[in-house]
Amino acid sequence: MSSASISGAAQMDEHQEPLRIMLLGKCGAGKSSSGNTLLNKQVFTADMTLARVTPYCEKEEGLVEDTPIAVIDTPGFFETDSNKKEIVREILKCVKLLEPGPHVFVFVVKLGRMTQEDQATMSLIEAKFGPRVWDYTIVLFTHGDCLGGKSINDAITKSDDNLRNFIRKCSGGFHVFNNKNPEDQTQVTTFMEKIQTLIALNGGAHYETALYPKEEQEIREKQDSILAEKNEEITRKEENLKEHYKDEELKVEIRKLWRREEELSRRTAENQMSKRLNFTRLLRVLLVLMLVALLIGWALQAPVPVLLPITLIWILMAVKVFPSTKGKIQQHLKRQWSTPEPLRIMLLGKCGAGKSSSGNTLLNKQVFTADMTLARVTPYCEKEEGWVEDTPIAVIDTPGFFETDSNMKETVREILKCVKLLEPGPHVFVFVVKLGRMTQEDQATMSLIEAKFGPRVWDYTIVLFTHGDCLGGKSINEAITKSDENLRSFIRKCSGGFHVFNNKNPEDQAQVTTFMEKIQTLIALNGGAHYETALYPKEEQEIREKQDSILAEKNEEITRKEKNLKDLHKDEELKVEIRKLWRREEELSRRIAENKMSMRSNFTRLLKVLLFMALVALLVWALEAPEPQPSQSDFDRFHQRVHPLKEQYSNVYERR
């Protein structure tokens, strides 16, 4: 071992800080297998038959002789079944795993020539980690068993220039692993010596935030800041997990917790940076346009008072010529100055289907009352908000159709009336149904929903099966395959397809993540639009428009009542009272709108009946009235008029 490596190792022993080694490379290069060989234990999943083995960053620790190490396995770049941007985010976001930063990047590549995909991976790594990344990198070749008795040096000698140039770029040089023979720990010892030499070459330092590209630096600093602000909240969540889990299971749950928090903080930081960058670009474009306009005005020797209108006209012309510019400006301003709009999700279904439990699972908190022993759990519409990863959502729970102790008409009114909860309209309807065959009651519920919401409702609907614990080891696809034709036909009718929840295991947030992906796909399918008033049946459209009008007229009165409530109540009690106030106002405005519509409808029907009766009476009178007989005086008058004409035509005929 060189003196540099010895001093580096001594430094590590002194501080007892593990060497943080990050494995990078394309999918299938052998990163996970190399991590197992390095740690001399099977900790990372490695399977050549799978397209995607490592979906997110994983860290495992161990000892190589007396040196503690922490190996970070990462998802493969350019996986065929994964979004490249998501993979890069997954690798860059793992602050907790990497803090304060890796000592070494290990670029894992199969033994052989440098492929175009390998070169693209190198370019992507440099773009995301910065050009200094190669100062901290060592190349690790896998499939050393394919050398066929030759040394790795022989193979490198006969390799192509691209590969050799890349190795020269990496300060750590290269090494080779035979992962089919992990018992050969001499290959690991030699590799660790090279790593120690590389660390010494970098002064014992790790790869820190200042070495990343400027944009990534700012994102990471913002991410660190967000995690620091949420430190107490995360610590509290960790304590809660410690009460429910032990040993290895606890470690797994804490990893999941940090993975979620890192993902959320990373996305928040990226969104904030994106807004700032977009705003900067927008300002630059506007400044360039203004400068061009001023130069034109100066060239034309226009007076100063004229230059300002010229500048404005130039900008308007640019917007006119490039219509996308206007849209981009509007979109940017909307994103810049407005908070993210939550996805409004409305749960529908019959009583006891599991709507409230599904809402709780979706929000990952107990907010809706769910009790299988009660006949009526949700008497009126309720809305609760939350987040699924970085997506804000608003879930509206509704009373069940066909409750035995509830008037059907009142249930329908309760669901339709909640303008305040739904405004401007739900993005998605979730039809909740128990796992099993489609009952007659389910079919009646479907018919009622279509009658009240309109036939387009199914374009915005996804079917959610509950009681996923009853699948008995089968997949939901197998259950649907063996279901009756009515159920499959209904699912085909719904543009969002289907999903299944096991509400007895709400901690399994993977089922929620997958469900949200399907919801996002459905929203995209509908152009990002929500279900608006124009899609309801005509009668319901008019009622809703009238209800909106009544609430708008009473806005000042309602605001005054809200202020009075704020004087009397605080915090959660205030929220409850305001909900009650709006529930009363919505109920009243809905009934007034329905009554006015009913009166107008009844008046229209009455007019139609009266007109019909008048028409019938007129026909009867026409049929029964006696036919008038001509009198003698009528004949005399007729003869007096006709006789001169007769004589005139007779004379004309005789002359001919």
Image (spheres, rainbow, N blue to C red):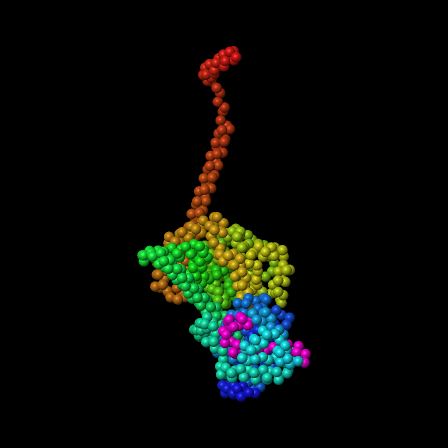
Identify the residue at image location x=40%, y=52%: 550
Residue 129 in magenta?
yes
Q: What residue span does the magenta drawing correspond to?
A: 121-149
Residue 176 in magenta?
no
Q: Main secondary structure of the magenta part?
A: helix
**Residue 110 visible here:** no
Identify the residue at image location x=41%, y=58%: 582
Residue at the right extreme? Answer: 148
Residue 571 percent coordinates (x, y): 39, 66
**Residue 518 visible here:** yes
Identify the residue at image location x=46%, y=14%: 644
Left or right: 120, with 605 as reference point = right
Residue 347 percent coordinates (x, y): 51, 59
Front-most of 616 and 158?
158
Identify the residue at image location x=51%, y=70%: 89
- How many labels were placed on the picture? 0
Front-most of 478 and 311?
311
Residue 435 percent coordinates (x, y): 59, 61
What is the quadrant of the N terminus in the image?
A: bottom right
Quarter-of-image position of residue 503: bottom right
Quarter-of-image position of residue 309: bottom left
Front-most of 366 and 147?
147
